[in-house]
Image (cartoon, helix red, strand yellow):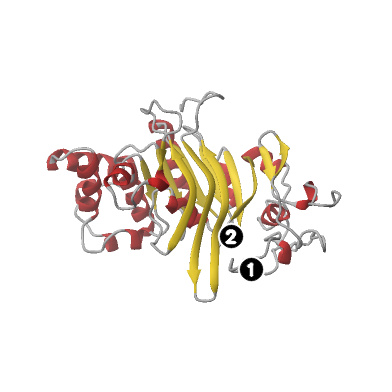
Amino acid sequence: MTTQPLATEQPLLSVRNLKIRIQMDNGVMNAVDGVDFEIQKGKTLGLVGESGCGKSLTSRSLISLNPKECETSGSIHYRPSDSEGEKGIDILSLEPNGKAIRSIRGRRISMIFQEPMTAFSPMYTIGNQIMEAIRIHRTKDKKEAKQIALQMLSKVGISDEEKRFDQYPHEFSGGMRQRAMISMALSCNPELLIADEPTTALDVTIQAQVLELMRSLQQEFGMSILLVTHDLGIIAQMCDEVAVMYLGKIVEQAPVKELFRNPKHPYTKGLMRSMPRLGGGKEKRLESIEGSVPMAIDMPPMCSFYERCKDRIEGVCNASAVPITSISEDHTVRCFLYSEPEGGESP
């Protein structure tokens, strides 16, 4: 079982005021706007929200993999387990293609990409691509690297690993490619695994197998996980804590049980109501959140969810930026329904 971190223990990763801006033809897009979160050692943090909310850009920034068009600011402090300093390494201060970040990327912080068919190169065998990471970070010996790669393929449930080692990505099914991607991500025993939509386009049976595999490997290796998804069912099953993201901002954050028991933000409630439930009846239609995520270009200081919110307050929610309010010690929400707007009384 994973050792539970002490309350006073420093988090493995701390993200503070992360901002990602992209210059577009019609203005500046604030794709990520002031994101804060922490990932504790041995724990799983879920990052949930609709497509276009900035989840993937946030996760890729943790290993400096965003395109060069992205102007990133803030701080991302990574504290390796063998580090004696409290502050750790500031990822954003490292050169994106420098030796320092390459010693962290893949070795200490690894990533399962959203679509393994495009993440794997079609020009090389699966085994060759898994071996490449092992030979960079663990051993230069080709035979030893192959043995480690075969062990990882077997560990993630790929049978006849000797044969599969020499096959190309197009010869694998979707579920097998996802397993191969997990084996490559875990081949160097990382401290943090970033899983960006790890079950996209998989049927429910394979999805359950992949999630169970990730959980068992987390317990075996004692690693932390950042799970990026839009599926609240996966969040409930996998995570210790969850951050709900909308239009580049975290609008609510809480332990997973607290969030499902006591959601506060109208967006979180909308996501909850859109989930299918057992015993709901055939006649009862699932609710949906009207509209879609807007483009975050030159947004005025106001609630980003204002246009889609059924509980919006005219002259309040669209008049100023929304502060973060603490509901309890570990539950925060960004909404005027729970805070006092500037120069006015609480609604």
- Element on which disc 2 rests: loop
Q: Is residue 281 visible?
A: yes
**Label annotation for residue 292:** 1
Residue appearing at x 55%, y 24% in the figure: 8
Residue 344 in percent (x, y) is at 85, 52
Side of 80 where 135 appears, left or right: left
Residue appearing at x 21%, y 49% in the figure: 132
Residue type indicated by callout 1: Ser
Of the pair 135 and 154, the residue shown nearer to us: 135
Residue type indicated by callout 2: Glu
Residue 292 in percent (x, y) is at 64, 68
Residue 271 in percent (x, y) is at 66, 55
Side of 66 where 136 appears, left or right: left
Disc 1 and disc 2 in contact, CB within 8 angstroms: yes
Mark 2 Cα within 10 Å, few/some/many (few <14, many 20+)? some
Q: Quadrant of residue 293?
A: bottom right
Residue appearing at x 68%, y 58% in the figure: 274
Residue appearing at x 51%, y 26% in the figure: 9
Side of 211 where 30 appears, left or right: right
- The answer to which of marks 1 and 2 sits earlier in the sequence is 2
Mark 1 Cα within 10 Å, few/some/many (few <14, many 20+)? few
**Label annotation for residue 87:** none
Q: Is residue 202 visible?
A: no
Residue 87 in percent (x, y) is at 45, 33
Q: Which residue is mark 2?
A: 50
Q: Quadrant of residue 175?
A: bottom left
Residue 282 vs 238, above or below: the answer is: below
Seen as rendered, the residue at the extreme bottom is: 25
- Element on which disc 1 rests: loop
Of the pair 19 and 188, the residue shown nearer to us: 19
Rounded to the nearest angstrom, the CA distance separating label 1 from label 2 is 9 Å
